């Protein structure tokens, strides 16, 4: 019960203002540019969603960051790509979590340890306040993996917007 109360408090006190401070417009533009840069070299579609906190009911229902990431993967139709190669990078600031949800083809090609390494790149530097650089480095790692497994051979069109979403 104590953990639930602590988690609820973190979610109540982490606001969109915190998100905008940690991920200002210039950082969001850099993230968008890094996604676009990678999508020139691979066929996958990458989406970044940054959420300051979940609502009270979600916390009281013990919704995990992983479950929320899966929900957003569906809501924003990251799965809706021709080759089933959508990837969501979800950042939950209140929980201090990064989750990656990958569509079927990508999930089969890339091992869980590689996803965890990308998440770790972000979270280990978040502690030091390095949100911009660690996110860009993680996206660079992600782009490298996607290029290795899904190289772009024909100059595909962009199926999902590269612009990060702030919730």
Image (cartoon, rainbow, N blue to C red):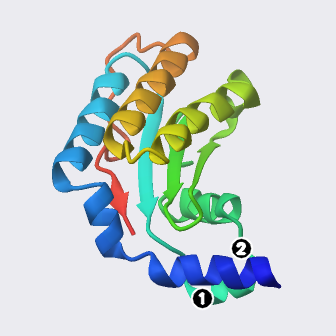
Q: Determine whether, in the image, residue 67 is placed left or right of residue 19.
A: right
Q: What residue appears at the point 73 percent right and 27 percent down from the top-left corner?
A: 113
Q: Determine whether, in the image, residue 6 is placed left or right of residue 52.
A: right
Q: What residue appears at the point 41 percent right and 15 percent down from the top-left corner?
A: 152
Image location of residue 84, percent across then percent down: 59, 37
Q: Which mark is residue 56?
A: 1
Q: Relative to 113, does residue 100 appear above or below in the rendering? A: below
Quick one: SS at disc 2? loop
Relative depth, front residue between 5 and 75 = 5
**Hey, which residue is sitting farthest right in the picture?**
1
Q: What residue appears at the point 60 percent right and 88 percent down from the top-left corner?
A: 56
Of the 4 image quadrants, the one containing the N terminus is bottom right
Relative depth, front residue between 100 and 105 = 100
Quick one: SS at disc 1? helix
Residue 43 visible here? no
Q: Quadrant of residue 140?
A: top left
Of the 4 image quadrants, the one containing the C terminus is bottom left
The residue that label 2 is drawn on is: 63
Q: N-terminal of the two: label 2 or label 1?
A: 1
């Amino acid at each position: 019960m104590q953990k639930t109360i602590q988690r609820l408090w973190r979610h109540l006190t982490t606001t969109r203002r915190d998100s905008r401070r940690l991920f200002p417009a210039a950082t969001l533009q850099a993230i968008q540019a890094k996604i676009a840069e990678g999508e020139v070299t691979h066929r996958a579609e990458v989406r970044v969603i940054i959420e300051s906190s979940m609502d009270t009911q979600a916390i009281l229902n013990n919704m995990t960051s992983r479950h929320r990431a899966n929900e957003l993967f569906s809501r924003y139709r990251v799965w809706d790509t021709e080759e089933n190669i959508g990837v969501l990078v979800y950042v939950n600031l209140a929980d201090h979590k990064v989750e990656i949800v990958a569509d079927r083809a990508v999930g089969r090609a890339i091992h869980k340890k590689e996803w965890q390494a990308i998440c770790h790149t972000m979270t280990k530097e978040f502690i030091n306040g390095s949100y911009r650089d660690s996110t860009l480095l993680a996206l660079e790692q992600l782009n490298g993996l996607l290029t290795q497994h899904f190289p772009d051979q024909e100059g595909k069109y962009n199926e999902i917007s590269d612009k990060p979403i702030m919730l």
